[in-house]
Image: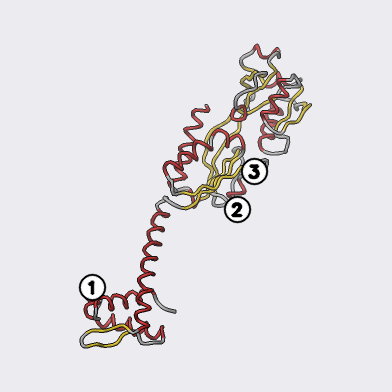
Amino acid sequence: MLDVRRMQVLRAVITSGSITAAARNLGYTPSAISQQLSTLEREAGVELLMRVGRGVRPTPAGSLLSEHAETLSSELARAEAALTELKAGHTGSLGIRYFATAGASLVPPAVAAVRREHPGIRLDLKLVEPDDPLPEVEEGRADVAIVVSPHERSAGKGVEFVHLLDDPYRAVLPKAHPLTRKRVLDLTELADEPWIGIDGVPGICRNILLDACASAGFSPNFVVESEDYQTAQGFVAAGLGVGLIPDLGLGTPHPGVVTRKIRNPGPFRSIHAAITERACGRPAVRTLLDAMREATSKVA
């Protein structure tokens, strides 16, 4: 196999016209240059230079390898420049996974910030719902996942959790409901109400709601199940029941509902960014997290 560095030495000799001049230009001794050329000729299996007076002239094979050495040198320089850009975080790809309510409020401004400050980064965005986005990071298919992460949850090896915000649940009531006269409700005040179920698929968000109700001493009576928060608000507005919806899920509340704070207990979703260790120090990831934190302050 031909050695690229020896091909570059060959080109230097051909360009300068002699081994002595090439050695002086490259900072080597003439004997070291000669050894490099002898090795290259053995690798090529053909003579590369002819002696002409005090200088040298390339054979057809020598001219051919010299031309390719120039091309390889240019490609190597481009590769080194691209690697420098990648190591500096200016290029490459960034895979981001998220759930719907985070996608609506946190992800867009963060993506806009990354594109503005790191235009060379290629973004791979994907909504993962109703499945959990965390395995996408744990299994190496993404760099960052926005997840709901209770304190007891643990990530796989090589994944770090970064807290973004605590997203409190709000009571959602029909506009004419008697409890709307109160500014803050104890969760037990909803114990005997019919409930609109949200996040009917078993999972973290549903468990947070059920655990809070259990702490208050009751199990909610779900009379209608809904697949999303906006549809659930429509059922509440129609007077079919009450529900708990996290702040990020409320969006623009339905005109037929009223929301109230909840206490004793006040359930919330702890939202984190799950990040692979290899991505933690990347400038684009820092920009992403900073923009999300700024977005959370506006949500709060």
CA gap, disc 3 to disc 2? 12 Å
Closer to the camera in the image, 85 or 135: 85
In the picture, residue 225 is in which quadrant? top right
Q: Which residue is mark 1?
A: 25
Q: Which residue is mark 2?
A: 139
Amino acid type of the residue tagged 3 in the rendering: Asp
Earlier in the chain: of badge 2 and badge 1, it is: 1
Number of dots carrying numbers: 3
Left or right: 257 with respect to 193? left
Q: Where residue 1 appears, x then y in whole percent?
A: 44, 79
Amino acid type of the residue tagged 2 in the rendering: Glu
- Residue at image coords 64%, 43%: 132
Closer to the camera in the image, 70 or 270: 70
Crowding around mark 3 (Cα neighbors within 10 Å: few <14, some 14 to 19, many 20+) is some
Callout 2 touching callout 1 (CB < 8 Å):
no
Q: Where residue 276 appears, x then y in whole percent?
A: 53, 49
Crowding around mark 1 (Cα neighbors within 10 Å: few <14, some 14 to 19, many 20+) is few
- Above or below residue 157? Residue 204 is above
- Residue at image coords 68%, 25%: 233
- Residue at image coords 28%, 75%: 12
CA gap, disc 2 to disc 1? 51 Å
Q: Which residue is mark 3?
A: 132
Amino acid type of the residue tagged 1 in the rendering: Asn
- Mark 3: secondary structure: loop
> Which scheme is used to colour this image of the protein?
secondary structure
Q: Where residue 255 appears, x then y in whole percent?
A: 65, 19
Q: Where residue 91 appears, x then y in whole percent?
A: 44, 52
